[in-house]
Image (spheres, rainbow, N blue to C red):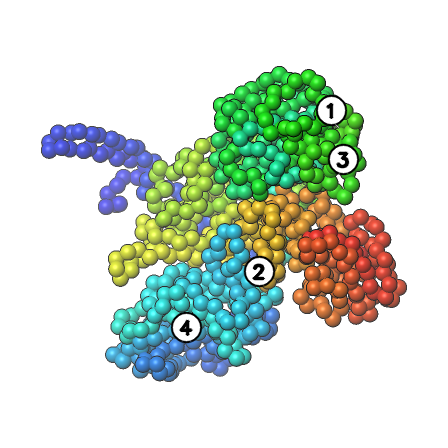
């Protein structure tokens, strides 16, 4: 018994006997194993309502009880289920939520007494009620919390005339059932978020369903299918259009009489859940935190040149070579800390589908070239060499592959490693990219051969021969965004500049280091206000505190970020590293089963998902609070801790026993919600402007997500290579359903890995929804977002009224359905039109504005708000030249 175990340090000894012989002995000493100091820690619990929410109100209107919270009401007149739910003063329900009983196909009527308020506080209020019928009695409670989440606990007890069908009906007005979102989703698609099909919808048990429109909606959720017995398991949850109502129907029990008492716990929540105090236009988040930011010299913006791989490179044998001018000093004698502050510099990458890439880059630790091969996420070759060089020097760089991979500088072999070819994978969908990320080089005479040819003098300028697949001199002026190679297909150019070459002209992929500016200062100049520091702030994945050796670096980083008037968010997830100090003692109790969120990183570790229904949240929350207290970070970048997971770990109470003895999973929605609410509270207690930025790709479970100050969605599509039509990958109805933020109450950003669309292409559709793409580098992507931030300040975006493309037909007309326009309007003070061409063809987008209806005089001027170039306007009509999946910000004054 626990009472007999002494406090403090306890030694547990085990002995294995074979008969009377001792064959094995082991012991372990544990420090306070039964009562760690964090067990049942109350951090984040409060009886105060945090901003921006308001206290729960209660009104008794005759026999009716009305609960109110910010912008929403829930009304009860008979029994424990809500009769009316409203949002923004508009009724969302077409009829009361009802538990329907049937026997032999005939409905059974309920009778009941008025509900009673049994608890009332600023943070919550509870109503209880009961119903009777000839077939069963129903008793239950509904508890409303200040964010509008209504938890309903029901007990259904059958009589001798037991029902053989039990359904819960949630009838919603059709205007608030335009879109359907259900959880969980699936990686690689957005099919769980879209316009509700005209034929309705059906599915197996689904723990979360939301119906809504562009402004508001209503969700239902349930942690498990315990006590569910639908006639068809694939149709446990259905949505049916029935005239003036759209009915979400839960098929709880069908096909046989209900002979035992059953309990159900359900949740409801009308959205949006809050009026955000800031938007992503205010937060201006950059995803590039690092301990080296205060010292790291900023290497200027980097461009890229992209060639199709097909026909221009072979996987079994070949040569890549070029002339390279370094715009930095390469010094292998530098201390490692100084090397790490410089970052890796990209030269040439062969990028293939399925997380496969290979090529050559200048490595920060080697201070020289490295060749790598990564196939399906696994690095299968890596070799490099150190090389001392001075800024401004030209060097010939080459590597070959056939029976081995060999690299050369100025004709001298600097390393070799055994490998047969570069890759056996097909190259048809591949891309050859020069530069792209940090690339402080001028590059000239790029050549790819179909044989492994060690370089020999003279190194160039080259003439094509029978083995030349690609040869680009870069001597011709870049026109139309493309190079003009002597051999091979042209390269698409973005962000590069012409420069003096080793032979004639060349291209500068990036800029040289400017020692007067740090990377942190560069971010500040661009307008960044928030920096996210990913997982490497601590050596243990998703841990709530860092290692002693990192503590002084974290102190320095926070002070430097604050000196630039920016905020710093630290990474947090719901993972547990097997090298963490607490793993051996607690992992069996706290991990999600089956194991989820498997991840590997450096230092070498295996990371697994934890369940928030366990005591692990009581370990994390006080340590997260202590981290804020000690170091002063401004909140958290949350990579999935809002994600409810199915769990069968009986050690902490998850799962349930099915009739056949197997364990059914439960989704920890309420426990996840508890963690997120407490994290929000502890963060805002310490930092009134603190942030919970949630990376939520596919996850719009609003009872858990609603605590975020902003969200970041879209990674589920980041593994799709370029090629598919953008709107086939991400239809606009799916974007409006999941990724806008406005009908959820959580401002949204979009995640773009430059595939299957570029950042600029993504902005052509995200800006139509007032959603930004988050930058994570220092180059062209950051420049584009910086221009948009500065435009928002200059125009007064915060004071503007958004007139989105789906509801502005009375004031905007376009000459093609592929041209869409969203307006930021300030009445007589002017407007900014987001004009997007969402087609695969370039066009001049014709747009007609109803100036009088927009509060503007007939005499107005228009200009591209970013480039400042004038845009001709006549009678409210403008023509905007746009490429495929392109946009322009047109300022009308």
Of badges 2 and 1, the one in the foreground is 1
Nearer to me, 688 or 851: 851
Mark 4 crowdedness (10 Å alpha carbons): few <14, some 14-19, many ≥20: some
Mark 1 crowdedness (10 Å alpha carbons): few <14, some 14-19, many ≥20: some
Q: Are marks 4 and 2 in contact (CB under 8 Å)?
A: no
On the image, the x and y values in percent for residue 186 come to 48, 54
Instruction: Say which label, 1 or 4, has the lower sequence index.
Output: 4
On the image, the x and y values in percent for residue 450 come to 60, 29
Of badges 3 and 2, the one in the foreground is 3
Q: Are marks 3 and 4 in contact (CB under 8 Å)?
A: no
Q: Which mark is residue 497?
A: 3
| Quadrant where the image shows the C terminus | bottom right
Quarter of the image holding residue 570? top right
Q: Which residue is mark 2?
A: 734
Of badges 1 and 4, the one in the foreground is 1
Element type where label 3 sits in the image: strand
Looking at the rendered structure, the number of numbered marks drawn on it comes to 4
Of badges 3 and 4, the one in the foreground is 3
What residue is drawn where x is 46% and y is 57%?
184
Q: CA distance from mark 3 to mark 1?
A: 20 Å
Q: Are marks 1 and 4 in contact (CB under 8 Å)?
A: no
Q: CA distance from mark 3 to mark 4?
A: 64 Å
Q: Which residue is mark 4?
A: 168
């Amino acid at each position: 018994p626990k009472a007999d175990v002494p406090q403090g340090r306890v030694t547990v000894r085990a002995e294995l006997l074979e008969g009377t012989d001792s064959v094995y002995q082991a012991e372990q000493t544990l420090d306070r194993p039964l009562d760690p100091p964090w067990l049942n820690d109350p951090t984040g619990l409060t009886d105060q309502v945090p901003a921006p929410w308001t206290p729960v109100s209660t009104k008794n209107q005759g026999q009716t009880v009305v609960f109110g919270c910010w912008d929403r009401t829930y009304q009860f007149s008979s029994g424990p289920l809500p009769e009316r739910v409203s949002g923004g003063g508009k009724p969302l329900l077409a009829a009361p939520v009802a538990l329907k009983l049937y026997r032999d196909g005939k409905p059974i009527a309920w009778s009941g007494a008025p509900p009673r308020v049994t608890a009332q506080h600023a943070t919550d209020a509870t109503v209880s009620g009961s119903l009777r019928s000839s077939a069963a009695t129903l008793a239950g409670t509904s508890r409303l919390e200040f964010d509008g989440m209504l938890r309903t606990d029901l007990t259904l007890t059958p009589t001798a005339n037991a029902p053989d069908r039990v359904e819960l009906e949630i009838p919603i007005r059709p205007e608030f059932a335009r879109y359907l979102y259900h959880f969980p989703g699936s990686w690689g698609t957005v099919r769980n978020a879209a316009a509700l099909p005209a034929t309705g919808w059906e599915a197996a048990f689904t723990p979360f369903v939301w119906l809504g429109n562009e402004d508001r909606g209503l969700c239902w959720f349930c942690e498990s299918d315990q006590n569910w017995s639908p006639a068809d398991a694939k149709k446990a949850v259905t949505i049916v259009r029935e005239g003036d109502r759209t009915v979400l129907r839960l098929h709880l029990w069908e096909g046989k009489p209900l002979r035992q008492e059953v309990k159900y716990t359900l949740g409801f929540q009308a959205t949006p859940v809050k009026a955000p105090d800031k938007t992503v236009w205010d937060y201006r988040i950059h995803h590039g935190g690092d301990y080296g930011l205060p010292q790291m010299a900023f290497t200027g913006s980097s461009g890229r040149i992209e060639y199709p791989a097909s026909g221009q490179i072979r996987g079994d044998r070949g040569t890549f070579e070029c002339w390279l001018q370094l715009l930095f000093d390469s010094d292998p004698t530098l201390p490692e800390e100084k090397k790490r502050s410089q970052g890796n510099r990209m030269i040439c990458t062969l990028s293939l589908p399925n997380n496969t890439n290979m090529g050559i880059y200048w490595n920060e630790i080697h201070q020289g070239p490295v060749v790598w091969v990564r196939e399906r996420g696994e690095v299968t070759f890596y070799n490099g060499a150190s090389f001392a060089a001075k800024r401004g020097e030209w060097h010939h760089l080459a590597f070959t592959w056939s029976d081995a991979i060999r690299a050369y500088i100025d004709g001298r072999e600097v390393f070799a490693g055994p490998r047969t070819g570069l890759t056996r994978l097909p190259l048809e969908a591949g891309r050859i990219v020069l530069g792209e990320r940090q690339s402080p080089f001028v590059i000239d005479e790029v050549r790819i051969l179909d044989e492994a040819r060690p370089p020999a003098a003279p190194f160039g300028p080259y003439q094509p021969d029978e083995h030349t697949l690609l040869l680009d001199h870069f001597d011709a002026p870049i026109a139309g965004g493309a190079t003009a190679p002597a051999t091979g297909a042209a390269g698409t150019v973005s962000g590069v500049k012409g420069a003096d070459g080793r032979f004639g002209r060349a291209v500068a992929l990036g800029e040289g280091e400017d020692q007067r500016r740090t990377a942190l200062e560069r971010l500040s100049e661009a307008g960044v206000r928030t920096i996210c520091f990913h997982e490497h702030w601590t050596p243990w994945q998703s841990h709530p505190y860092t290692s002693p050796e990192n503590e002084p670096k974290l102190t320095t980083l926070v002070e430097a970020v604050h000196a630039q008037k920016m905020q710093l968010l630290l990474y947090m997830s719901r993972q547990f590293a097997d090298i963490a100090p607490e793993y051996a003692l607690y992992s069996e109790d706290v991990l999600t089963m089956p194991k989820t969120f498997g991840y590997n990183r450096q230092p070498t570790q295996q990371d697994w998902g934890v369940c928030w229904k366990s005591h692990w949240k009581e370990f994390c929350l006080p340590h997260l609070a202590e981290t804020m207290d000690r170091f002063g970070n401004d909140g958290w970048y949350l990579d999935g801790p809002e994600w409810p997971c199915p769990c069968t770990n009986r050690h902490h109470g998850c799962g349930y026993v099915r009739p056949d003895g197997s364990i059914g999973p439960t989704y920890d929605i309420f426990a996840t919600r508890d963690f997120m609410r407490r994290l929000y509270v502890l963060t805002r207690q310490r930092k009134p402007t603190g942030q919970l930025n949630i990376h939520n790709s596919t996850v719009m479970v609003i009872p858990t997500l609603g605590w975020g100050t902003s969200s970041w969605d879209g990674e589920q599509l980041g593994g799709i290579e370029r090629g598919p039509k953008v709107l086939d990958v991400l239809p606009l109805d799916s974007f409006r359903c999941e990724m806008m933020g406005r009908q959820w109450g959580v401002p949204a950003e979009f995640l773009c890995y430059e595939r299957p669309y570029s950042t600029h292409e993504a902005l052509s559709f995200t800006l139509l929804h007032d959603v930004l793409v988050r930058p994570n580098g220092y180059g062209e992507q950051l420049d584009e977002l910086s221009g948009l931030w500065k435009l928002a300040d200059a125009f007064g975006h915060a004071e503007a009224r958004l007139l989105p493309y789906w509801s502005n037909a009375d004031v905007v007309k376009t000459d093609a359905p592929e041209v869409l326009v969203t307006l930021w309007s300030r009445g007589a003070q002017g407007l900014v039109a987001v004009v997007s061409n969402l087609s695969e063809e370039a066009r001049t987008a014709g747009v007609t504005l109803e100036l009088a209806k927009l509060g503007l005089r007939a005499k107005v001027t228009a200009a591209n708000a970013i480039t400042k170039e004038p845009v001709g306007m006549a009678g409210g009509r403008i023509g905007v030249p746009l490429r495929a999946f392109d946009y322009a910000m047109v300022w009308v004054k």
